[in-house]
Amino acid sequence: MLFRSFMTDYEENPGRIVWGILCSFTTAFFAGALAAGIYTGQLEQIIPGFLTICSRPSQFTMDYFELGTLGGAFLNTAMVALACVLMLKVSQAKCNGLTVAAYWLTVGFATFGMTFTNIWPFFFGTWIYSKIKKVKFSTVANLAMFSTALAPFASELMVRYPGLEAHGFTVAGVLGAILLGIFVGCVMPPLIAHIPTFHLGFDLYSAGPAAGFLAFLLYCVLYRSPGIEVPTNTHLGEGYKAFVNVFFFLVFALCIFTGISMDKGSLRRYTKLLKHHGHKTDFTTEFGIPVTLINMGMYGFFILLYYNAVHGFVFADGAVTFTAAKFTGATMGAIMCMFAFVAQGAQPATVFPVAVGYALASLLPFGAAYFGLVETQNWNLCTQAILVGMCFASGLAPISGKYGFFAGVAAGAIHATLVMSVPLWHGGFCLYNGGFTDGVVAFLLVPVLDRFYGTYEERMEKRKAG
């Protein structure tokens, strides 16, 4: 009876079901916070840990598992998620695949860069934008979530700027963060609307280039031009591999179970989605919510498998050693951010070539160390920045979908070589660093592919023509 009611609601108002799904994920994070407190024996530290996270700078990347305990990080994630779903509800926004993306990108960074305190200036700023342009806030609610890509700037102004040590909240700092939020909230919507002409729809993380270029401007204004020393905030722990795996396994399995229960034929139709190129699409509209839910689960398991299977190979002292990925707050956040466009083009078949490209690119620093060109290997597949980078490289999935496997491999390899250098542009204050890099890769690669390679369909037609 419950799923029959779900299907009735879906047919009458699919946006309501999307919102309900996001509420379910939010509830899971609250449950995860409680379970994490019990698992670590730090139940009494959940709220203090959450408050610590909310009162510290959030420059990319701080591991909130380490800063505020596992339970505190989950509670911060749950509170950020709650803020998003309440904003959608109060504004009566129409929820679709883009809403799913905006939600997961906001929630995803709540374990290593986003806090319950630093999102509000941007929500407020986008609301101001809606008043200036005389449009309903519901039409820009998704953009409010995307604007939080620059949340670390707000934390800096509130608790640290212009020094190197956090001094706590000040009235001037809070007012500065609000003014920053108004500026970003008013500028991001037109930038996001324009940026597809930059990457031609081949960057699923379309807000990434907009956020990156704007972060570059703010970084220069606040730090580089006045000569203010740039703080560093990176600190990583050992992570919680077992807990993160069990949590996501349950969440992804429930997605598949729910999708099949809503529509028995959805699993069969999912094979059609796996053949889709993922370029300029919304799976919730094209394939329906049940099939999209199955993609959420299947793609989620694909992500989880990748992070468990990937190993970095390091050459040092004449020997090769292998390192596994640490399931830190940043890794968990990367999993959730990689999950963001599960309803708008991301799926296992088109993301796999990008992952292969990352693996091939990792041979470059390994080879440099092996042949003595450098003393120390610069990075490997399990370097934290690369683990997070691979998450956002998945945004290049439409390239492999439209141009084929080897084009996807090339896109992934180029992304891997660029992603650790891009933070030099914005000082680590843009959370969408990998999405920004996606835009640069698409800008460089897609015109060349068009001119010399052609899409998969075009190549097939030429073969048929003889």
Image (cartoon, rainbow, N blue to C red):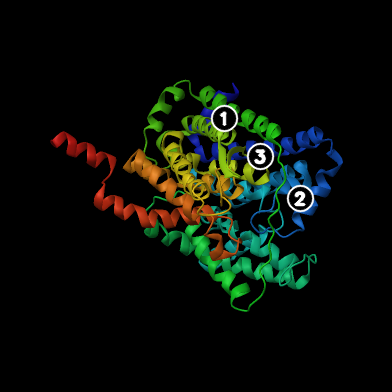
Circle 1 — which element?
Answer: helix
Q: Position of residue 224 (x, y in %)?
A: 60, 74
Any part of residue 205 in sight: no
| Residue wearing tag 3 | 327
Q: CA distance from mark 3 to mark 1?
A: 22 Å
Q: Position of residue 36 (x, y in %)?
A: 76, 36
Q: Residue at x 69, y 39 (%)?
A: 29
Q: Are marks 3 and 1 in contact (CB under 8 Å)?
A: no
| Residue wearing tag 1 | 255
Labels in figure, total: 3
Q: Nearer the viewer, residue 340 or 95?
A: 340
| Residue 364's disc number | none
Looking at marks 3 and 1 on the same chain, the residue that comes earlier in the sequence is marked by: 1
**Is residue 413 rendered to the left or right of residue 27?**
left
| Residue wearing tag 2 | 67
Looking at marks 1 and 2 on the same chain, the residue that comes earlier in the sequence is marked by: 2
Looking at the image, residue 205 lies above or below residue 8: below
Give the class, few, some or many, for how many residues have Cα within 10 Å of label 2's Cα (few <14, many ≥20): many
